Amino acid sequence: MEETPMPEPLRRAVHQLISEAVMNCQEVLRYTEPDIAHDWKRMTMIHATDVSDTMDMASMLIAAYCQRTGMALDTLASYLQTRQQRSRAAGPRDADRYQVDGMLGTPLPPEDVQSAKTRFSMGQRYAENGPMDEPDEQRLFTEAVLHGLRARLCDDVDSLDGYLPPQVALLARKVAEVLEVPELAAT
């Protein structure tokens, strides 16, 4: 395994792209909140696809570097996990629709396909007692960090109280306070 570090210009580009993706993740979360839900469909999809596109750009920059330095194409394809990729242009698949059916309590279509049943069941678990049902410490912390970071970067910490659940707002405020740049003492 090669022990050379990532070239500094590539590292800076990747860090910039990751920062952009994180900001868009926060926007996705923000538009799920009831107080600003009037435009949730458009805004959550726009920001979620921006996250995906930005992460694709980071992956492709790294892949281009690896290819340039002689990485075998089959190794590159393996690292890029190309077998998992699917195009958004094709739109939602049946499996996606089955999962939404399970979330919303719509009857499962009569197709006798195991993948349909699996995705339907996943949707049911989200609706009934899914991973998001109970406050999860890791999820709450992740949301608070994203919201607190955004509030600090935008210098708008007071906005945290306007649309977040109280427990997330409290944690986000703490995150924003920790990120506050202290003023240097005059010498």
Image (spheres, helix red, strand yellow):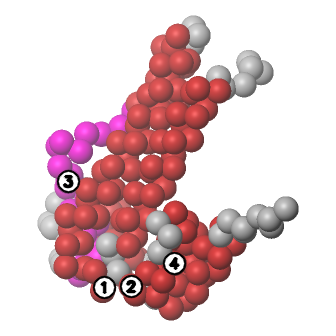
The residue labelled by disc 2 is 163
The residue labelled by disc 3 is 92
Q: Quadrant of the C terminus?
A: bottom right
- Indicate the position of residue 169 as horizontal and vertical percent values: 52, 84
Q: Given this view, does label 2 or label 4 mark the residue nearer the observer? A: 4
Q: Given this view, does label 1 or label 3 mark the residue nearer the observer? A: 1
Dot 1 or dot 3: first in sequence order is 1
Residue type of the residue flagged with mark 2: Tyr
The residue labelled by disc 1 is 34
Q: Residue at x 20, y 68 (%)?
A: 41
Q: CA distance from mark 3 to mark 2?
A: 29 Å
Q: Determine whether 2 is above or below 134 in the image.
A: above
The residue labelled by disc 4 is 157
Q: Residue at x 52, y 34 (%)?
A: 13
Dot 3 or dot 2: first in sequence order is 3
Cβ–Cβ under 8 Å for marks 1 and 2: yes
Element type at mark 1: helix
What kind of secondary structure does the magenta stretch mostly adopt? helix
The extreme bottom residue here reads 166
- Indicate the position of residue 48 as horizontal and vertical percent values: 33, 56
Q: Given this view, does label 3 or label 2 mark the residue nearer the observer? A: 2
Q: Given this view, does label 4 or label 1 mark the residue nearer the observer? A: 4
- Which region of the structure is painted magenta? 83-105
Image position of 86 (left or right of 64): left
Element type at mark 4: helix
